[in-house]
Image: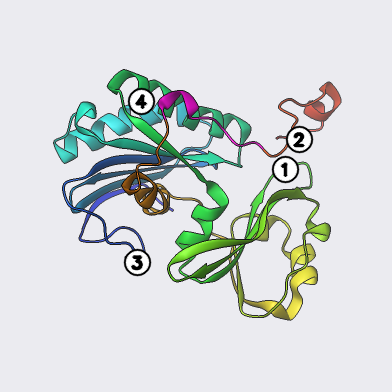
Amino acid sequence: MSEQSWRVRGKIAAGEYEHESHVNLLAFDTSTEYLSLALLRGDDVFTFNTMAGQSHSQLILPQLQKLLHEAELQLEELQGIAFGAGPGSFTGVRIAAGVAQGLGFGAHLSVVGVCTLMALAEGSGADQVITCLDARMGEVYHAAYIKEAGTWRAERAPGLYKPDAVPRLDGFGWVGAGNGWQAYSEALGQVYADQLQAVRAELVPTANSILTLALPVFSKGEATPASEALPVYIRNRVALKTEERAQGLAL
């Protein structure tokens, strides 16, 4: 995914959710090495995506300000903020939650945290998706989703697994999504074998998908105060041991 910024008219993301006009929402994700931003202004969506590496904290606020300027909006004119709550990079999901809290408090905006694995499923364009993000240390963040009547149902809730010990699933025609499929393609392929229709290892959670998933929550009035913008880790450990750092491992 190269750096890009563009405007889309009409519908959000895959185009399956029609939103009410004149709603202004901000969405972002920093859970992977990519920085992804999306700003909804009525019927227009302004997005920005770039390979940020370890520079999310330096890039996110200036790029958000540029997106607001492009959309000719002030932060106070938004109705809410959606963010990728995790799982993902520990530092990345903390950045997203922290920015959502800070901006939400400052502009008195409500927030919606969206599971990054569900955002992966949304961005895949498929209706049966096995999402896997590389969790480092020989593990993956895993979930399986099925879309029914335009709504995602978790066939397997998000969890942390060794690649050869991910949950078994019934049925065929599954699509694999996320960089866990690239990092552990052999092990995951052995588990699911001929159940797979395709694998999209290049996919990352995007702000556009997060926006799509968050819109119904905002519409139902179920957004939460900024103080409840919390990261979802799944893995309990938040730091490496000295010997693990020496081995070049990462969380």
- Mark 4 or mark 1, which is nearer the start of the sequence? 4
Tag 4 residue: 104
Closer to the camera: disc 4 or disc 2?
4
Closer to the camera: disc 1 or disc 2?
1
Q: Which amino acid does label 1 sit on?
A: Arg
Residue 93: name its quadrant: top right
- The percent coordinates of residue 77 (x first, y second) are 19, 31
CA gap, disc 4 and disc 2: 34 Å
- As rendered, which of 218 and 105 lies closer to the eye? 218
How crowded is the residue under tag 1: few (<14 C-alpha within 10 Å), some, or many (20+)? some
Q: What element carries label 2?
A: loop
Q: Residue 16 carries which label?
A: 3
Q: Residue 249 carries which label?
A: 2
Residue 205 covered by magenta stretch: no
Q: Look at the numbered discs 1 and 2 and tell me whether their residues touch, using CB distance below 8 Å.
A: yes
Q: Which residue does the image show at 17% across and 34% down from the upper left?
A: 73
Q: Which amino acid does label 4 sit on?
A: Gly
- Mark 2 or mark 4, which is nearer the start of the sequence? 4
CA gap, disc 3 and disc 2: 40 Å
CA gap, disc 1 and disc 4: 31 Å
How crowded is the residue under tag 3: few (<14 C-alpha within 10 Å), some, or many (20+)? few
- The percent coordinates of residue 251 (x first, y second) are 70, 35
Q: Which residue does the image show at 72% across and 75% down from the upper left?
A: 170
Q: Residue 136 carries which label?
A: 1
Q: Is mark 3 on a helix, strand or loop?
A: loop
The vertical placement of 129 against 81, above or below, is below
